[in-house]
Image (cartoon, helix red, strand yellow):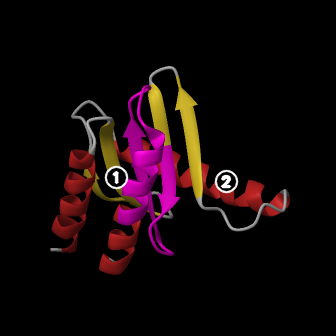
Amino acid sequence: MRADMLTSVLTDLNGTSADIEASGVISTDGLMMAAVLPQAMDEDRVGAMSAAMLSLGDRTAQELERGTLEQVLIKGDNGYVLMTYAGDEAVLTVMAKPNAKLGLIFLDVKRAAENIAKLL
């Protein structure tokens, strides 16, 4: 039931912008809780990578005295990966196209993360 509600939030998020290609809710230990991913994308790999990057981001923010981590953004030739906390125990990961309007995506991701945190 909860997984269905999380998937619904992700489906709504993916529908807000044609620039969003995939999204997932991952526990902080790397287990996929819900996902709307392309078929060729491995859920386990996305979950493990998201948890690892967020953990590294936390450590970096702490060690370099940047305060509490809000998000991790990765830009590659083929697009963006954005990770942000959705409550204390989950991570929202979003993949976007290379020409994405990041301001709008940041806003939509923030809202989705708040909704996910309420569900968890």
Which residue lies at the image location 68% right of the left edge and 60% below the top edge?
58
Q: Disc 1 versus disc 2: distance between alpha carbons?
A: 18 Å
Residue 26 placed where, x, y %?
Answer: 40, 59
Residue 46 placed where, x, y %?
Answer: 41, 44
Q: Is residue 1 magenta?
A: no
**In this figure, which residue is indicated by the disc labeled 2?**
57
**In this figure, which residue is indicated by the disc labeled 1?**
24
Which residue lies at the image location 50% right of the left edge and 63% below the top edge?
29
Residue 9 placed where, x, y %?
Answer: 24, 62
What residue span does the magenta drawing correspond to?
82-111
Can residue 31 be seen here? The reply is no
Which residue lies at the image location 32% right of the left edge and 39% below the top edge?
20
Label 2 crowd (10 A; few <14 / some 14-19 / many >=20): some
Label 1 crowd (10 A; few <14 / some 14-19 / many >=20): many
**Vertical arrangement, residue 82 with respect to residue 5, above or below:** above
> Quarter of the image holding residue 71?
bottom right
Residue 85 placed where, x, y %?
Answer: 50, 64
Mark 1 or mark 2, which has the lower sequence index?
A: 1
